[in-house]
Amino acid sequence: MAKKKSNIPAPTPVSWRDIPREIPDHVATPAGRVRQLKGFFKIYAVVCGAVLCVLLVLAAPRLSREFQAALAARIPDSPVNHVEIHSNGPLNRNIGWFNSHVGLPANSTLQRFDHVALRNVLLGFGQIESAVVEKKVPDRLVITLTERTPFARLAVNGPDGLPSIRMCATDGILYEGYDYAPSFFSSLPWVTLRSLQRDGQGGFKPAPEITLALELLTVARRQFPELAASFKTVDLTHYYGDRNDPASWVTVNSTMVTRILIPSNGFDKSLNRLRSDLARLRRDVGPLAEVDLRRLPGSPFQSEYTIVPVPPPAPPAVPAKTSRATASLRRL
């Protein structure tokens, strides 16, 4: 059977170049090319600006030094004639202390004076927590100090072996205090430590256990100010570093109670109990030689605290009567 011929014409070959393409207007038109160039220049400007900022940050210290040197060269150098001290403690405006313990090098001039070295010397005093030294044209040095505030005092042996006194700061620093008022100095309680370590420079390393005495005094002043004002000595020789250790306690000597033994892990509870009972005890028992607060309920002792009254004074000795024979022998 013969095949029928199709009337459909054969497809004409088509190249990919003949396929119609849609070109975006922002590229094909001159305005689009201008916008494209503007975007490129924006990116270029941002990159150059970032590089310039990095270079300025790196060169800022050098530029500052050169500017200060140029400024100093134009300002006439003059001797340092005035020193001002501003502080929050007894060293405020204390030029006598500065001249006797620090001083200035001979022929010191303002522009050539090493204020960084003076700041380091000031920070060598434990009483000074921070120091800022500023040069003021034409001939002034302004020193701004922040002093540590002591809460207790400590008796130690100095580098020469002689007895000395150190002030106890709230951060555990032990330092030699200068020019505190006698009334303030005498109001500070004494602290006794089990051991101290020297720092090799004539002083002592910070004592972390000092903060335990600070906590005790803070709680006592808040809960029982009358008793806290009577504290004379806070003895930490029986504190071994762990406040939860049953064998650790703090001994306080006061004018109201000669000795108070306080567990190292319960200042709030112990002093609260003592506050409620002390007036009754002093009325019923009399002067107290010792109150042992380690025996509070819940402590390892599991019993009431003990009280030791002050023994009555012994009666004065009565001289023995001598016989007439003995008296006559003595005359012979």
Image (cartoon, helix red, strand yellow):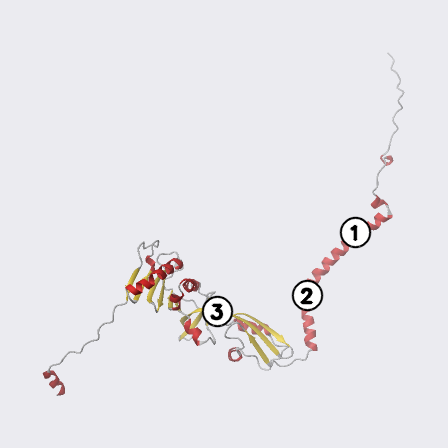
Looking at this rendering, what residue extends furthest in the top direction?
Answer: 1
Drawn side of residue 102 relative to residue 73, left or right: left
- Residue shown at 74%/55% (left/top)? 47
Residue that badge 2 annotates? 60
In the image, residue 288 lies at what x, y percent?
Answer: 30, 66
Q: To which quarter of the image does residue 290 belong?
A: bottom left
Q: To which quarter of the image does residue 204 belong?
A: bottom left
Looking at this rendering, what residue extends furthest in the left direction?
Answer: 325
Disc 3 vs disc 2: which is toward the camera?
A: 3
Q: To which quarter of the image does residue 308 belong?
A: bottom left
The 10 Å Cα crowd at callout 1, few under 14, some 14 to 19, many 20 or more, is few
Name the mark on residue 39.
1
The numbered mark, 3 or 2, whose residue comes first in the sequence reads 2
**Identity, as a three-letter code, of the amino acid under mark 3:** Thr
**Identity, as a three-letter code, of the amino acid under mark 2:** Ala
Name the mark on residue 149.
3
